[in-house]
Amino acid sequence: MNDKSELLSQLKIDRSQKEAPRSSSKFAYLLGGGALAALIFGGAYMVIGAGGDEQPTANDAANTSAQQSAATAQSSNAGTATPSAASTTVAPSDSVLNASGYITARRMATVSAEVIGLIKDVTVEEGMAVKAGQVLATLDATLPQVDLDLAQAQIKVLEARLASTNANLAEAKRVLARASELKNAEFSSEASVTRAQADVDSLSASAASTRADIEVAKLSVLRQKERLDDYTIRAPFDGIVTVKAAQPGEIVSPSSAGGGFTRTGICTIVDMTSLEIEVDVNESFIGRVFEGQEVKANLDAYPNWDIPASVIAIIPTADRAKATVRVRVGINISDPRILPDMGVKVAFLKA
């Protein structure tokens, strides 16, 4: 029995030894929980303080006032050399009206032939500078050359006929002189003298007719030369070739022909010294524009380049469809950068 009692006593739990660690463990748990709660509340307070509309404290207000005073002093020390954005003023524009238009040429021609012909040669290319009278193209001139040769041959025939008539006339005059002498010596009749006089008159008339025919033949030669010259196309004025519209082997005609294969022009020439600006101004504002008014032009290709110009004329008619009035503006300088059909913006300046 004693052994069993000892065994049972060994199986009992000594609560006095376990109670102290349990209480210390609970205290540790409570302490850790309190610290965690303090951290959570502290973080929430910091977030609310950063994002809320918190009023500044007395120290914060003092610091802010000091910073504003320092900024004011710094701006006063800087002087008026660098004005603030609010005090910056922009100078008013000198223009009374802005518009847009295009560069045009007063002298521009599409050169063609006066006759229908086969193009034999074209001597120009795009961008080439040409002088007035320079040959641009030639046509096949076989037939007009033959006609010219024929007219010149006719002149030679008439001149030979005139020489023969003059020789006969000289002989007729000698016969008339002998007949007159014989008549005076009473060795010839009046009829022979009259017949000799008729021959002289007839040959004189024939010689005059031949001379007139020669003049007509010469005029025909001149006409054939002019016609032959029509087969050579020349530049009408100094300029630049902007378009080449025909090639050798094609047919050219002064008017369009059926089929669509006949060229109506050889090339287009532009006189670069006649360039000007053409602007359509709204009729509501045309009163702000006057002849001789100074204009500042800016090409769309060179927007930072101010081109001096002036108003040449205001065309005295309005476009009913667009309600605009066309204004011609002359360019006061000559520059290779200014090209026909370029877009341009113009500002009409105050007087």
Image (cartoon, grey):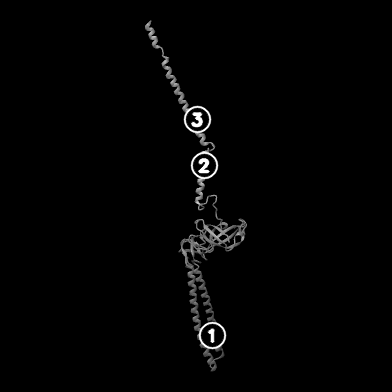
> From where the camera sits, is residue 226 visible?
yes
Could you say which quadrant of the image residue 258 lies in?
A: bottom right
Count of numbered tags: 3
Q: Which mark is residue 300?
A: none
Which of label 1 and label 3 is nearer to you? 3
Upstream in the sequence, badge 1 or badge 3? 3
Q: Quadrant of the N terminus?
A: top left
In-front residue for pair 315/266: 315
Upstream in the sequence, badge 2 or badge 1? 2
**Label 3 amino acid?**
Phe
In-front residue for pair 109/251: 109
In-front residue for pair 327/170: 327
Give the residue at x 55% y 89%: 193
Give residue 223's position: percent from left, percent from top: 52, 72
How far apart, in angstroms, are the residues tagged by discs 1 and 3? Answer: 151 Å
Q: Which mark is residue 64?
A: 2
- For disc 1, the marked residue is 200
Identify the element where label 1 is drawn. Answer: helix
Give residue 296's position: percent from left, percent from top: 54, 59
Identify the element where label 3 is drawn. Answer: helix
How far apart, in angstroms, are the residues tagged by discs 2 and 1? Answer: 137 Å
Give residue 171's position: percent from left, percent from top: 50, 86
In-front residue for pair 106/125: 106
Give residue 15's position: percent from left, percent from top: 42, 15
> From where the camera sits, is residue 109 visible?
no
Q: Residues within 10 Å of mark 2 (few under 14, many from 20)?
A: few
Q: Which mark is residue 41?
A: 3
Which residue of the protein is positioned furthest toward the top in this rendering?
Answer: 1
